[in-house]
Image (cartoon, rainbow, N blue to C red):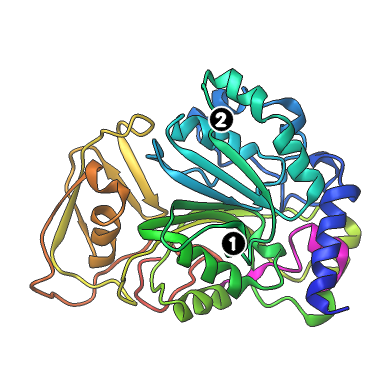
């Protein structure tokens, strides 16, 4: 049996039979709701308890401005994030969940009509597929067909991460967004630990070293991405600490777009104004960990940020003044204070 096949079987076994509910996890890597914004809580309260108790996410990969979108959730599990999204995209939107664990997909499918009725929809706006996130074409997902791709602590589980990201940017529409939460490592996980079934299931041994993630995206032509949230991962189990405690793990929420970016932040004199018209963010909009746009206040931005705010679905919520006719050099872009682990791009980059 190939190593990748064994990893897939170990993951299916861990999330299909070993874990019965989220409290069975041995670490804090794949189960936290600490970063979820307050407006999502009443929506989450409407989700069936059987769906919620099998939640294994490590963040809250639910961005703003979702009405009417087609959204894909990679590794949807029992469907918690899909049923949150179903309320946010509305009946005219579409939410597609993909997972390779039969038991998880069965739970998600079981409660589709329950949630449709709770939400007051005439027809369901969710669909769940048993399949692999490395091969979305076999599920009928065509090129440039999805507005938003999310994932919640799943990509680390894939033995073929390059294929996963290649598929993501194949199916995203131009200007579409990837917004995902996952576990990242402060250094490469030793080869001797990468096939440990418990460490795999706990989202540790498959965690990407952040610089390798940056390099992977560069090979796909994605030259800028942003860190939205950054939280340490708690290793609660002594046996796990003895094996892999020499590595620092962090749960990051990351966003990027299918847009032609430059590899560092360049200054073209753009200034951005947030209109304050997003219902869930009436006073300020958080693009990432160092861009907070307060309603009506001018904010100088680099060329890449200007593209994010004009060439994506966020364009209607911003006024960006300026063009690319005059270049003023490198843009001084980044958090005021260094952030451990998550400074993942070349010197001078925005993200």
For the point 86% across and 69% down, which residue is it? 196
Q: Is residue 219 left or right of residue 201?
A: left
Q: Tell me residue 171's x, y (percent).
A: 47, 61
Residue at which label 1 appears: 136
Q: Is residue 110 left or right of residue 324?
A: right
- Label number found at residue 289: none
Does residue 208 show up magenta in the picture?
Answer: yes
Q: Is residue 307 left or right of residue 199?
A: left
Cα gap from disc 2 to disc 1, whole angstroms: 22 Å
Residue 272 on image: x %, y %: 19, 51
Residue at 77%, 30% (x, y): give it.
50
* Residue 116 in view, yes or no: yes
Task: Find residue 182 and report its horizontal and vertical position in percent.
Answer: 62, 57
Instruction: Quadrant for the N terminus, please.
Output: bottom right
Judging depth in this view, the residue of 289 and 69 nearest the camera is 69
Q: Which residues are magenta?
A: 195-210
Q: Please give left or right for residue 261 compared with residue 247 in the image.
A: left
Q: Do tag 2 and tag 1 residues touch (Cβ < 8 Å)? A: no
Identify the image quadrant of residue 131: bottom right
Q: Position of residue 173 (x, y in %)?
A: 38, 58
**Residue ID for mark 2:** 124
**Residue nearest the viewer, comparing 21 with 349:** 21
In this picture, is 280 found above or below 30?
above
Secondary structure of the residue carrying tag 2 is loop
32 in magenta: no
- Please, which residue is most extreme toward the left here? 325
Quadrant of res 303: bottom left
């Amino acid at each position: 049996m190939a190593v990748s096949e064994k990893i897939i079987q170990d993951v299916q076994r861990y999330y299909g039979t070993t874990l019965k509910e989220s409290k069975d996890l041995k670490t804090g890597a794949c189960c936290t709701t600490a970063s979820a914004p307050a407006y999502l809580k009443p929506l989450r309260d409407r989700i069936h308890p059987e769906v919620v108790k099998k939640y294994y996410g490590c963040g809250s990969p639910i961005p703003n401005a979702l009405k009417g979108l087609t959204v894909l959730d990679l590794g949807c599990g029992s469907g918690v994030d899909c049923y949150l999204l179903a309320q946010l995209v509305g009946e005219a939107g579409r939410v597609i969940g993909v997972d390779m664990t039969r038991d998880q997909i069965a739970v998600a499918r079981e409660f589709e009509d329950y949630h449709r009725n709770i939400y007051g929809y005439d027809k369901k706006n969710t669909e769940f597929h048993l399949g692999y996130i490395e091969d979305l074409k076999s599920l009928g997902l065509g090129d440039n067909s999805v507005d938003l791709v999310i994932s919640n602590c799943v990509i680390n589980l894939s033995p073929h991460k390059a294929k996963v990201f290649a598929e993501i940017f194949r199916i995203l529409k131009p200007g579409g967004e990837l917004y995902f939460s996952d576990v990242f490592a402060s250094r490469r996980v030793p080869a001797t630990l990468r096939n440990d079934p418990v460490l795999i299931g706990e989202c540790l041994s498959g965690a990407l070293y952040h610089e390798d993630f940056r390099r992977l995206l560069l090979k796909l032509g994605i030259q800028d991405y942003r860190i939205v949230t950054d939280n340490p991962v708690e290793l609660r189990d002594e046996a796990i600490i003895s094996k892999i405690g020499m590595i620092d793990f962090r749960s990051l929420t990351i966003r990027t777009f299918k847009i032609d970016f430059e590899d560092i932040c360049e200054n073209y004199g753009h200034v951005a104004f947030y209109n304050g018209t997003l219902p869930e963010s009436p006073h300020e909009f958080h693009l990432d960990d160092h861009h907070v746009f307060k309603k009506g206040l001018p904010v100088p931005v680099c060329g890449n940020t200007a593209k994010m705010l004009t060439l994506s679905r966020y364009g209607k919520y911003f006024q960006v003044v300026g063009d690319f006719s005059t270049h003023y050099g490198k843009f001084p872009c980044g958090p005021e204070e260094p952030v451990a682990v998550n400074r993942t791009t070349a010197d001078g980059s925005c993200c």
